[in-house]
Amino acid sequence: MKIVSLNTGLPREVPWHGIKVTTGIYKQPVEGRVTLRTLNLDGDRQADLTVHGGAYKAVYCYPLVHYDYWTRELPHRDLPMAIFGENFTTDSRSVPRKWSLHSLACLATNLAFDSNLTTW
């Protein structure tokens, strides 16, 4: 598995159904090295730590091939890297349970599965 895009972002307030909510979904691709720490990447934060972030959800990975699916489903929508809030856009179909990143050993602890994306 290789990282195609490394993405970070900070929480921000946005309007949603007439109220303001804080979200960390907005990420931007970054160049160069970024330190992965126990709770997140440098330059990245999560807004709701009850469901995102922390020691067992420090980064979010999303396979690049899923962008192809969503491009077909949303043909008039621009889908730049990190649009799904991922920290690592990867070149694999899925994120393996165990993988390494340079000298760092990583363990996927919370694998999400979308049955709609397995049919192609």
Image (cartoon, rainbow, N blue to C red):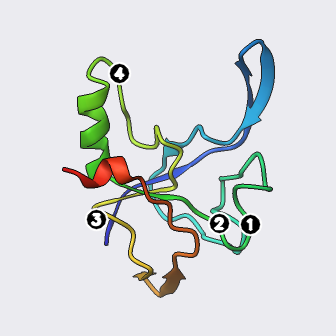
Q: Which residue is mark 2?
A: 57
Q: Contact, CB < 8 Å: mark 1 with mark 4? A: no
Going from N to C along the chain, the mark reached first, 1 or 3, is 1
Nearest the eye: 93 or 41: 93
The disc, 3 or 2, on the residue closer to the chain's N-terminal end is: 2
Task: Indicate the position of residue 93 as horizontal and vertical percent values.
Answer: 28, 62
Q: Amino acid at mark 2?
A: Lys
Mark seen at residue 24: none
Judging by the rendered image, the residue that carries numbered circle 4 is: 77
Q: Earlier in the sequence, mark 2 or mark 4?
A: 2
Q: Are marks 1 and 2 in contact (CB under 8 Å)?
A: yes
Decide which of 79, 113 is in the foreground and name it. Answer: 113
- Residue at 66% x, 53% y is 43
Q: Find the distance from the CA under tag 2 to the CA under tag 4.
A: 28 Å
Q: Position of residue 86 (x, y in %)?
A: 50, 51
Are there few (<14), some (14-19), or many (20+) residues within 10 Å of tag 4? Answer: few
* Contact? badges 1 and 3 (CB < 8 Å): no
Name the residue that disc number 3 marks: 92
